[in-house]
């Protein structure tokens, strides 16, 4: 059972790294970016190409995936997304669905539709047995990296000037602008960073979540659930939500295989009925 | 009676009257039965898609509910109609159709409470979640649904015991067209009724709607249920005309494509779904002949393009075109102005 | 028995007390004004009365019936309607359609889905009557969004009136109305039928003193004074609230 807990936590932290960019985007610009998963996919495929085909070491492949996806995110943001910020939610939904469709088809065309596997270095294969609990080395790495990232994120948001500008802009965009904060720049940087994180998550997660062109659509609902349950006003909200969902999903699929997938859907619906603004969100109305 | 009352009465009666353009549209629609006898299969798909789109227009265009999960009702009814035919529970297609619609409406009623509260994102999530859940259910219980292979062994009895479904889709098309027309007439009635107008009001300003006594939640539940029923009719029609049902009836792509269909045609005037379905099918036919595998890419492209160009601009073009055609039509069908109807 | 009564009405937002111990008793047919400096809580009181806000304490009685927990739309059906300080209209509908909606709801046929709007003579008659009364005949087919502000304000009141209320709550009806269109608005308000009880929130003292037969003064969420216009005008506390503000500013 502890293995399940361990796996669930690893899965959850991975989900968090994948989804936190979406949460911040939604909270900051009130923008529903359904194409978020496409950046994760991009990071995954980037790593696959680097590590499998070119032979770049895994340890290098991850940060490159982050940087490349962040750059891609920044590019898309400045050229495409910026035109759609002020539009209605319906327009945003249509736009980002369009982007997802395009990216899924494009990746299918270029890379083929089969599942891709990242060649994990020997050192990370296998598991440790600690007190009788089996812990896969790879998942341990995930927990480590994602944990560090979470701490770093929290520090950036809480302690840096950029972080306080970000928090101000999330809280009230108009006032932030009035204070002289360049909200557009904050958003560009945040969007790029969030996409980069998604890309890193995609690269890390290829082993666990699987990587194929349908990734953005398959996992869309998971990201949305994290954001809905966790709320968009903090980092800790989505973090706790991801852990909760990760454990629930893994445990559900293990103990009740026939209906395991429904556990998260049920959680989603229950939370949406009980607390529409998210389990962990602040209660101030937006 | 106050002199304005006659004016008010006449105006309200006039706006709900079937315009010559509408009548021409439906005459032409039924004429396609004889005009394009070799195209009945694709026309059937178009009619089904049109009905499906009308169901989305009712909740999106009129009540303002963004839904990414209309496929849930489409698919549920699709499987229901297939199963009742396969196991001989309901043999006559029209009766099965009605029951399938009711089943879908029931699901709509039950899930409607989830879309009442919450923001656009919440509604998106809930509708998407319900559709995905059903998809997952259908996948899991593949012993009933046939899973990824689809529902096999479905045989549909002749309509009303008289009209057998044929290989060329003739019976199927006439059947679908009639169902589409009847459903459309009902939807049109709803839209021009006080109920329909109240939907438009609570889409625009739910606070004020409540402040003039409109029970907002009740109206939303009602239209969501009705729209689910219509989507169910479309889904059942698909199963009945193809004698087959598979998992893609519940897929995200189906709901997303439906959004595109409605957006192409325009929301909020009911004909948008019909026009959008025709354009979509044309596009699909054309693009599929060019690049059969990457149809999804071009769908995505069209979506992005539409949003970047601006829906309002496109709707403005649509409005201008419609007004132009109406003026043409008025001149062609010129007749003396009718006396104002007595109230 | 007063037609509208509040007993110890209170509203807290966390630590902020927006209204406390507000007790009003308004007689049928009264023309009651609620005045007070900005931020005194007047709109909060209206929101509490109409059910947009839930009170932290206190009761609201409409025509002898406890409506404290009723949903807003139910209160409308029991005979209480309101206007909003900032126009809340249906931008894409025409005045005719908007009023038609309110009238249909009030006549109980708002939920009819099988009938065409306008097929009932009672409905069209009522629509016509209200359009006449509120002088909207010349704009009744225009989209609300493009109407001049004065007409929009008239429509705002017309919508509330179309609900055939026993009690009409007007939240700063003259706010923002340009001088040229003011006269029409004030005349319309003055011509409201005697059976309708009116509770008016206003800053425009000319309107208040010419219209109201009773005035309540709200300051910092609490009722300071209540009485006839002459009494209130003479009351030193009222003067200090208004003048005192000016001195501080």
Image (cartoon, rainbow, N blue to C red):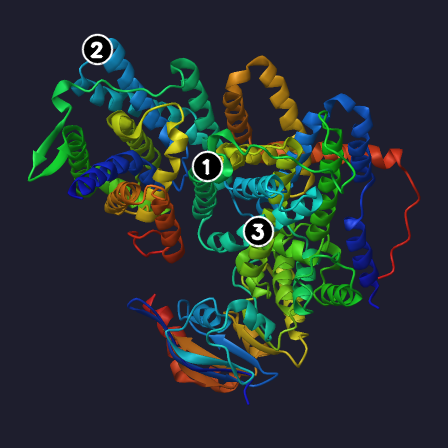
Q: Secondary structure at mark 3?
A: helix
Classify 10 Å Cα crowding around label 1: few (below 14), some (14-19), many (20 and above): some
Residue C154 percent coordinates (x, y): 64, 62
Q: Which residue is mark 3?
A: B224
Q: Residue furthest left?
A: A131
Classify 10 Å Cα crowding around label 3: few (below 14), some (14-19), many (20 and above): many
Image quadrant containing the C terminus of chain C: bottom left
- Which residue is depicted at the point 40% across and 15% down? A112
Q: Chain of mark 1?
A: B
Horizontal placement of B28 versus B118: left or right?
A: right
In whole angstroms, how far apart are the C-alphas of marks 3 and 1? 29 Å
Image quadrant containing the N terminus of chain C: bottom right
Asked if A230 appears above or below A125 in the picture, the reply is below
Q: Which residue is mark 2?
A: A55
Q: Which residue is mark 1?
A: B142
Q: Chain of mark 2?
A: A
- Which residue is depicted at the point 46% across and 43% down? B124
Q: Nearer the viewer, residue C153 or B205?
A: B205
Residue C21 percent coordinates (x, y): 38, 80
- Which residue is depicted at the point 72% across and 66% down? C130
């Amino acid at each position: 059972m502890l293995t399940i807990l361990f796996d669930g936590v690893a899965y959850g932290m991975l989900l968090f790294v994948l989804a936190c960019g979406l949460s911040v985007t939604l909270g900051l610009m009130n923008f529903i970016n359904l194409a978020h998963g496409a950046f994760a996919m991009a990071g995954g495929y980037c790593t696959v190409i680097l590590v499998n085909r070119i032979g770049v070491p895994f340890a290098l492949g991850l940060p490159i995936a982050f940087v490349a996806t962040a750059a891609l995110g920044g590019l898309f943001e400045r050229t495409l997304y910026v035109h759609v910020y002020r539009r209605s939610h319906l327009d945003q939904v249509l736009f980002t669905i369009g982007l997802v469709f395009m990216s899924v088809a494009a990746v299918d065309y270029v890379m083929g539709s089969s599942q891709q596997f990242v060649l994990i270095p020997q050192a990370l294969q296998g598991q440790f047995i600690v007190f009788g609990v089996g812990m896969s080395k790879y998942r341990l790495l995930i927990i480590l990296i994602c944990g560090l990232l979470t701490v770093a994120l929290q520090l950036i948001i809480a302690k840096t000037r950029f972080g306080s500008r970000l928090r101000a802009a999330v809280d009230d965009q108009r006032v932030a602008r009035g204070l002289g904060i360049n909200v557009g720049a904050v958003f560009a940087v945040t969007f790029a960073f969030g996409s980069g994180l998604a890309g890193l998550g995609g690269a890390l997660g290829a082993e666990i979540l699987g990587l194929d062109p349908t990734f953005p659509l398959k996992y869309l609902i998971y990201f949305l659930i994290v954001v809905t349950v966790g709320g968009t006003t903090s980092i800790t909200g989505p973090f706790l939500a991801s852990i909760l969902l990760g454990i629930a999903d893994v445990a559900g699929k293990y103990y009740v295989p026939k209906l395991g997938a429904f556990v998260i859907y049920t959680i989603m619906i229950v939370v949406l009925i009980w607390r529409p603004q998210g389990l962990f969100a602040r209660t101030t109305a937006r | 009676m106050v002199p304005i009352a006659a004016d008010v009465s006449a105006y309200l009666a006039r706006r709900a009257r079937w315009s010559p353009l509408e009548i021409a549209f439906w005459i032409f629609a039924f004429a396609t039965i004889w005009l394009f006898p070799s195209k009945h299969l694709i026309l059937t798909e178009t009619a089904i898609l049109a009905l499906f789109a009308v169901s989305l227009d009712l909740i999106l265009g009129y009540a303002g509910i963004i839904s990414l999960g209309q496929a849930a009702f489409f698919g549920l009814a699709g499987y229901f109609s297939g199963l009742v035919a396969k196991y001989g529970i309901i043999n006559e297609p029209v009766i099965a159709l009605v029951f399938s619609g009711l089943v879908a409406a029931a699901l709509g009623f039950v899930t409607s409470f989830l879309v009442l509260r919450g923001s656009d994102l919440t509604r998106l999530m809930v509708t998407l979640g319900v559709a995905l859940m059903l998809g997952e259910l259908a996948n899991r219980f593949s012993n009933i649904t046939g899973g990824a292979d689809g529902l096999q062994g479905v045989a549909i009895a002749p309509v009303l015991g008289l009209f057998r479904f044929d290989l060329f889709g003739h019976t199927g098309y006439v059947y679908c067209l009639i169902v589409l027309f009847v459903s459309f007439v009902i939807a049109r009635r709803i839209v021009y009724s006080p109920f329909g107008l109240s939907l438009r009001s609570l889409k625009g300003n739910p606070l004020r709607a409540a402040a003039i006594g409109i029970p907002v939640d009740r109206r939303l539940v009602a239209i969501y249920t009705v729209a689910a029923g219509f989507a169910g009719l479309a889904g059942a029609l698909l199963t009945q005309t193809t004698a087959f049902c598979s998992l893609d009836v519940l897929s995200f792509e189906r709901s997303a494509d439906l959004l595109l269909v409605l957006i192409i045609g325009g929301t909020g005037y009911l004909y948008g779904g019909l026009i959008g379905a025709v354009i979509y099918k044309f596009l699909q036919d054309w693009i599929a002949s060019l690049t059969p595998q990457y149809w999804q890419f071009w769908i995505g492209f069209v979506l992005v393009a539409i949003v970047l160009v601006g829906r309002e601009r496109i709707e403005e073009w649509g409005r201008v075109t419609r007004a132009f055609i109406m003026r043409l039509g008025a001149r062609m069908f010129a007749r003396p102005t009718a006396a104002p109807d007595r109230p | 028995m007063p037609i509208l009564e509040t007993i110890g009405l209170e509203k807290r937002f966390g630590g902020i007390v927006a209204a406390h111990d507000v007790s009003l008793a308004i007689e049928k047919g009264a023309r009651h004004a609620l005045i007070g400096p900005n931020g005194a809580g007047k709109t909060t009181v209206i929101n509490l009365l109409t059910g947009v806000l839930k009170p932290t304490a206190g009761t609201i009685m409409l025509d002898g019936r406890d409506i404290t927990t009723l949903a807003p739309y139910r209160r409308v059906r029991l005979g209480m309607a309101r206007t909003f300080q900032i126009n809340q209209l249906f931008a894409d509908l025409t005045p005719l359609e908007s009023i038609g909606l309110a009238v249909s709801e009030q006549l109980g046929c708002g939920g009819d889905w099988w009938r065409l709007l306008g097929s009932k003579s009672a409905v069209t008659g009522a629509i016509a009557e209200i359009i006449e009364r509120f002088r909207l005949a010349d704009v009744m087919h225009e989209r609300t969004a493009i109407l001049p502000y004065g007409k929009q304000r008239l429509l705002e009141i017309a919508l509330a009136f179309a609900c055939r209320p026993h009690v009409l709550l007007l939240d700063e009806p003259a706010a923002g109305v340009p001088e040229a269109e003011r006269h029409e608005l004030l005349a319309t308000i003055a011509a409201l039928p005697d059976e309708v009880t009116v509770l008016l929130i206003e800053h425009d003292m000319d309107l208040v003193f010419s219209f109201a037969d009773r005035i309540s003064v709200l300051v910092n969420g609490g009722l300071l004074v209540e009485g006839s216009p002459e009494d209130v005008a003479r009351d030193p506390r009222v003067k200090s609230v208004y003048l005192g503000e000016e001195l501080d500013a």
